[in-house]
Image (cartoon, rainbow, N blue to C red):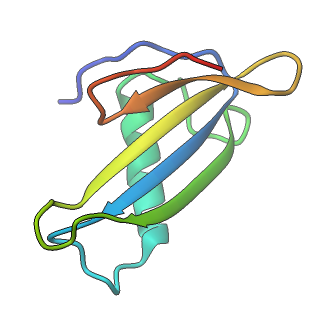
Amino acid sequence: MIPKAQKVEEPVEVEIKVMIGKGWRRNRDIDNLIKPLIDVIKNSGIITDDNSTVVKKIRIFTENYDIKNEPASIHMTVKTHEAKGEFCGAYNVHIKEKGTDC
């Protein structure tokens, strides 16, 4: 079971950074990661739904890591949407710290 987390103000944008490391298959389809990862933040209570009213933008990218020594990891950031139309603040998922700096 996924523990419940602090809910963020909606709508949001989600950034998914895949740190390529030991155990990562180079020919993996990166787009197949999106749905299960968005479901994690929904099921943990960070967002109420994963529809286009709540999730306005999804960005996914890879970054090379220490392929020989460090295991692959995924870092997700959920950014809240301010009334001015700017995204400000963040909730980091699968990272020990959560940030709220603009």
Q: Quadrant of the N terminus?
A: top left
- Front residue (pair 53, 94): 94
Left or right of 10, for residue 19: left
Q: Total label count? A: 0
In the picture as drawn, the residue positioned furthest to the bottom comes out as: 27
Residue pushed farthest right? 84
Q: For residue 65, what is the image quadrant?
A: bottom left
Left/right of residue 25 with respect to residue 80 in the rendered view: left
Residue at the left extreme? 69
Is 94 drawn above or below residue 73 in the view shown?
Answer: above
x, y (%) of residue 6? 41, 12
Snapshot quadrant of residue 54 = top right
| Horizontal and vertical percent position of residue 10 | 66, 21
Which sits in the foreground, 97 or 15? 97
Location of residue 60 (image quadrant): bottom right
For the point 10% across and 65% down, which residue is it? 69
What is the quadrant of the C terminus in the image?
Answer: top right
Name the one closer to the observer, 53 or 101: 101
Residue 86 against residue 61 in the figure, above or below: above
Residue 57: percent from left, percent from top: 69, 46
Taking the spot 30% from the left edge, 36% from the top edge, the residue there is 94
Viewed as shown, does residue 83 lie left or right of 91? right
Query: At 60% from the left edge and 54% from the top edge, which residue is drawn?
Result: 59
Left or right, 38 with respect to 102, comes to left
Whether residue 32 is situated above or below residue 71 in the rendered picture: below
Seen at 44% across and 53% down, the residue is: 17
